[in-house]
Image (cartoon, rainbow, N blue to C red):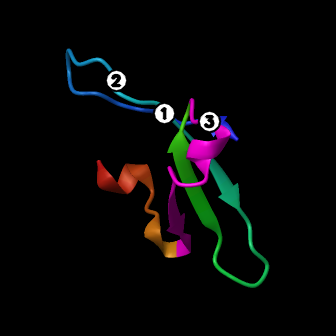
């Protein structure tokens, strides 16, 4: 698990920090789960977003 990078508009303070974990599945697409950095164990059961395999693009291709 690593701290995720976050970006803000000029002059704005960040409103939240997120962590992520990559889940490598043998029989299904890999997953990336994003969740609040300081989430409690209880919050982690509901406060996450998952993205799958081809949902990702290289950051450089979006700039």
Tell me the residue that label 2 is attached to: 14
Q: From mark 1 to mark 2, how far is it between C-alphas?
A: 11 Å
Count of numbered tags: 3
Q: What residue is pinned by disc 1?
A: 5
Residue 61 x %, y %: 36, 56
- In the displayed structure, does residue 15 sit left or right of residue 33? left
Helix, strand or loop under label 1: loop
Between 54 and 12, which is closer to the camera in this rendering?
Answer: 12
Mark drawn on residue 40:
3
Mark 2 nearby-residue class (10 Å; few <14, some 14–19, many ≥20): few
Residue 46 numbered mark, or none: none
User: How far from the left and from the top, in percent, is residue 58?
Assistant: 45, 56
Please give the name of the residue rendered at 74% of the width and 73% of the height, measured from the top-left corner. 25
Image height of 5 relative to 28, above or below: above
Position of 40 relative to 51 (above/below)? above
Other residues around mark 1 within 10 Å, as few (<14) / some (14–19) / many (≥20): few
């Amino acid at each position: 698990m690593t701290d995720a990078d976050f970006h803000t508009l000029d002059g704005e303070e960040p409103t939240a920090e997120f962590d992520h974990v990559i889940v490598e599945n043998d029989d299904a697409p890999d997953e990336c789960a994003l969740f609040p950095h300081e989430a409690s164990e209880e919050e982690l059961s509901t406060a996450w977003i998952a993205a799958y395999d081809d949902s990702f693009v290289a950051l450089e291709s979006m700039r």
